[in-house]
Image (tube, helix red, strand yellow):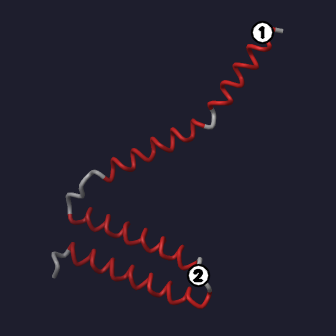
Amino acid sequence: MQSIMKRIAGLMLIAGSLPFLPTHAATDAMSRAESRQLIEDKTPQAQYQTSRKEANAAYQEALAECRKMQSGERSGCMKEARSNLQNDLAEAKRSVSGGR
């Protein structure tokens, strides 16, 4: 009887710690992502690629916000988001070409 109680207690202890395992993995992944952000882009091409990624991420966020709007406002919002993306990409290209 006592060994069954010990086993149950051990299983409860293991089961109780399971929800924290994915959190630790997510925290570890986030710290790796943050450490990559601290590395400076040294070449113009790397800077351009980073600018493109940021512009596309901002565009996706803007689209998500636009989708929450009423249908009458959504179209204009999406056009503005697309225009902002095009401007951001053009600026990224200009910065790589030295502002020419």
Find residue 66 and report its horizontal and vertical position in percent: 54, 79
How many marks do you count on the picture? 2
Q: How far apart are marks 2 and 1 (CA)?
A: 61 Å
- Is 37 above or below relative to 98? above
Q: Residue at x 66, y 26 (%)?
A: 14
Find residue 28 and report its horizontal and vertical position in percent: 45, 41
Q: Nearer the viewer, residue 49 or 36?
A: 36
* Amino acid under disc 2: Met
Please tell me in which quadrant of the rendered image residue 96 appears.
Answer: bottom left
Q: Residue at x 32, y 64 (%)?
A: 50
Identify the image quadrant of the C terminus.
Answer: bottom left
Q: Dot 2 corresponds to which residue? A: 69
| Mark 2 secondary-structure assignment | loop
| Mark 1 secondary-structure assignment | helix
Q: Residue at x 79, y 8 (%)?
A: 2
Q: Nearer the viewer, residue 12 or 60?
A: 12
* Amino acid under disc 1: Ser
**Label 1, residues with CA under 10 Å away: few <14, some 14-19, many ≥20:** few
Please tell me in which quadrant of the rendered image residue 19 appears.
Answer: top right
Sequence-wise first label, 2 or 1: 1
Q: Dot 1 corresponds to which residue? A: 3
